[in-house]
Image (tube, rainbow, N blue to C red):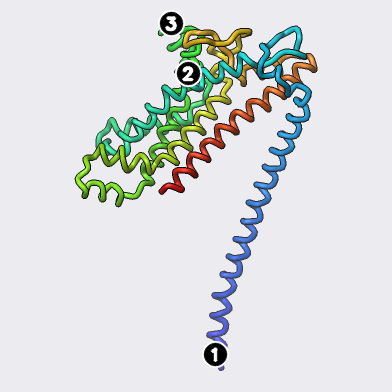
Amino acid sequence: MSATATRARGATARTLPAKRVRWADELFAWALRLCVGVAMLFLAALLVYVVVRGWPRLDGDLVTAYTSVIRPETAGARAAIIGTVWVIGFVALFCLPTGVLAAIYLEEYADRERWWNRLLELNIANLAAVPSIVFGILGLGFVARMLGLGFTVITASIVLSLLVLPIVIIAAREAIRAVPGSIREASYGLGATKWQTIWRQVLPAAVPGIATGSILALSRAAGEAAPLLLLGGLSFISFDPDGLFSRYTVLPIQIFGWISQSREEFQTLASAGIVVMLIVILAMNSTAIFIRNRYQNRR
């Protein structure tokens, strides 16, 4: 009886911690659900507030008319929308090829025992955490003044490219690193060179991750306002930017300018502008999800 009782007590002692662990897991899972629910509730409330506030100005004039400081009832964000397209288009042109090529070098060619490669990786990680206003100060002192490019589209594009370049590099490196090594070995076994393996096997397999990270980085650039406040984005623009060396404004700066006005009509106009910017960013994020799912289905 004594041995039987001892075994029963041992089994009970082993069962209780397992029950406590399961109870703790359930509690943690419900806490996570609660946090997500609260975040989604606040987000939905913010979206509803912005849409309701800006609904009277969600019309054709918002995207076809130029801004005005006298008649907010008919003012629009045409120059800001076109300026955003110009700036983000050149950000993509400058940043994406550079970021992907840098990721290929660091993952496929760089010798991690070399001090300069370790220094490069350290700098990329540090630049990803630098506040955006610091890039604005750098752009003002070096790009706009020392290089003489002024407060133009190309200045804004270069500075925003530097801002999101570490994000593109890190996302592309993770996507390339996630490609199984067996794909590379099979390609080498068939006689392919290193570059042929990267170009025809590794990069197609890494496209979903690269595209997702790149478009999310561009979405961040599209929503940045702090660096452009120092780079001429706050200018009153009543014309379409037409080139790299044209003056410009972008949607975040235009919304900031409207909110700064005291008249109620400008507050309504700013809310409508926020809705337009959210639609643009959501469209970019949806494109990233579509590209990722399409390439994942092909694999």
Distance from the alpha carbon under mark 2 to that under mark 3? 15 Å
Residue 293 position in % (x across, y down): 49, 44
> In the rendered image, which residue does mark 1 sit on?
4
Q: Residue at x 42, y 25 (%)?
A: 95
Residue reaching furthest to the bottom: 1
Q: Residue at x 66, y 25 (%)?
A: 276
Q: Secondary structure at mark 3?
A: loop
Of the residues shown, which amino acid type is indicated by label 2?
A: Ser
Q: Secondary structure at mark 2?
A: helix
Q: Mark 1 or mark 3, which has the lower sequence index?
A: 1
Of the residues shown, which amino acid type is indicated by label 3?
A: Gly
Label 2 Cα neighbours within 10 Å, binned few <14 / some 14-19 / many ≥20: many
Q: Residue at x 69, y 15 (%)?
A: 76
In terms of image quadrants, where is residue 260? top right
> In the rendered image, which residue does mark 2 sit on?
157
Location of residue 11 with respect to 192 vertically, above or below: below
Residue 268 position in % (x across, y down): 76, 21
Distance from the alpha carbon under mark 1 to that under mark 2? 78 Å
Location of residue 130 with respect to 174 vertically, above or below: above
In terms of image quadrants, where is residue 9? bottom right
> In the rendered image, which residue does mark 3 sit on?
148
Residue 171 position in % (x across, y down): 43, 37
